[in-house]
Image (cartoon, rainbow, N blue to C red):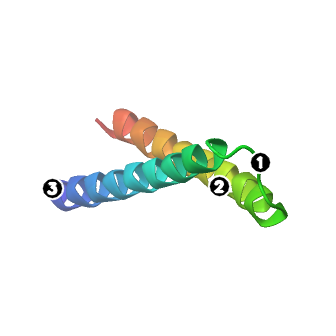
Amino acid sequence: MDEVNDATLSAELGRLHAEHQRYAQRLEELLQKPYLSADEQLEEVRLKKLKLHAKDLIFALERRTLVVA
């Protein structure tokens, strides 16, 4: 059963890392522009929040694995 939990946890961590990277890449694209439209400014704020949320989830899952191990 622990192997299933480890595999599930690893898959979730991988998904969250990929998601975090996608947000970071899109933010970098936006920051390369000389100015942002109103929609792009909203997207920037939204992406920053999503990126932070993904990072928080990653941290929580990694910390949980350390406690269990």
Q: Residue at x 73, y 60 (%)?
A: 40
Alpha carbon of mark 3 to alpha carbon of mark 2: how far?
34 Å
Alpha carbon of mark 3 to alpha carbon of mark 1: how far?
49 Å
Q: Quadrant of the N terminus?
A: bottom left
Label 1 vs 2, first from the N-terminus: 1
Disc number at residue 3?
A: 3
Q: Residue at x 23, y 52 (%)?
A: 6
Q: Is residue 18 left or right of residue 35?
A: left
Q: Quadrant of the C terminus?
A: top left
Q: Is residue 23 left or right of residue 48?
A: left
Q: Position of residue 43 (x, y in %)?
A: 71, 61
What is the three-letter code of the residue carrying label 1?
A: Tyr
Label 3 vs 1, first from the N-terminus: 3
> Which is more foreground, mark 3 or mark 2?
2
Q: Residue at x 66, y 46 (%)?
A: 33
Q: Position of residue 50 (x, y in %)?
A: 62, 55
SS of the residue at dot 2?
helix
Residue located beneath label 2 in the image: 47
Residue located beneath label 1 in the image: 35
What is the three-letter code of the residue carrying label 2?
A: Leu
Asked if the residue under mark 1 is in contact with the one under mark 3, i.e. CB atoms within 8 Å, the reply is no
